[in-house]
Structure formats: C-alpha cells, structure tokens
Image (tube, rainbow, N blue to C red):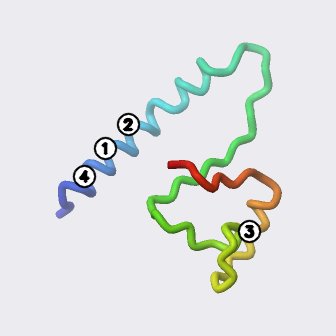
C-alpha cells in the first residue's frame, strides 16, 4: 500500500513524463538540432557534493560532470 505523498509524487512524475515530449517538440523550431541537456533535480536543501565545495564528500563522477557543465548555486 502506498501513502498519499507517494501517490501524489507518482502522479506528478507520470504527468510530467507524458507532457515533456510534446512540450519539447513544440519548443524546438523545425529543422533545428535538438539540444543536449541533462537536468538533475534533487529534493534537498543542502547540496552536499564536492562540486559545491564540500571536501568531506567523495563524489568524483558528479564533480567531473559539474566541471564540464553548469552548476547552479542559488536555484531557489
């Protein structure tokens, strides 16, 4: 049995997954190449990763990915 919070999270994720392909197709002009985007969303108010300057956390793969991409420090 799932609780209310898990149900709402699942419904929201499912709705987003169904709507995303249509939104992406309408957002990209015809003939243009599709952007290469990897977007991580983490539900935590404390970014405890090496790429945020935490030296006691060992996260080499995420740190390497962050060096080649963009890290948002204040995405409230």
Badge 3 or badge 4: first in the primary sequence: 4
Badge 2 or badge 3: first in the primary sequence: 2
The answer to which image quadrant residue 21 occupies is top right
**Quarter of the picture holding the N terminus:** bottom left
Residue that label 2 marks: 15
Residue that label 4 marks: 7
Contact between labelled residues 3 and 2, with CB atoms less than 8 Å apart: no
Most distant residue in the top direction: 30
Residue that label 1 marks: 11
Contact between labelled residues 4 and 2, with CB atoms less than 8 Å apart: no
Which tag is nearer the camera, tag 3 or tag 4?
3
Most distant residue in the right direction: 68
Residue that label 3 marks: 63
The image shows residue 73, relative to residue 15, as above or below, that is: below
The answer to which image quadrant residue 37 occupies is top right
Mark 1 Cα within 10 Å, few/some/many (few <14, many 20+)?
A: few
Cα distance between the residues tagged 3 and 4: 33 Å
Residue at 76% of width from left, 61% of height from top?
A: 65
Which tag is nearer the camera, tag 2 or tag 3?
3
Cα distance between the residues tagged 2 and 3: 31 Å
User: Does dot 3 land on a helix, a strand or a loop?
Assistant: helix
Cα distance between the residues tagged 4 and 1: 6 Å
């Amino acid at each position: 049995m799932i609780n209310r919070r898990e149900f709402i999270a699942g419904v929201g994720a499912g709705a987003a997954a169904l709507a995303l392909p249509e939104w992406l197709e309408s957002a990209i002009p015809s003939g243009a190449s599709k952007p290469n985007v990897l977007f991580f969303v983490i539900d935590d108010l404390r970014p405890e990763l090496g790429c945020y300057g935490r030296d006691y956390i060992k996260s080499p793969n995420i740190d390497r990915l962050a060096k080649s991409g963009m890290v948002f420090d204040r995405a409230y």
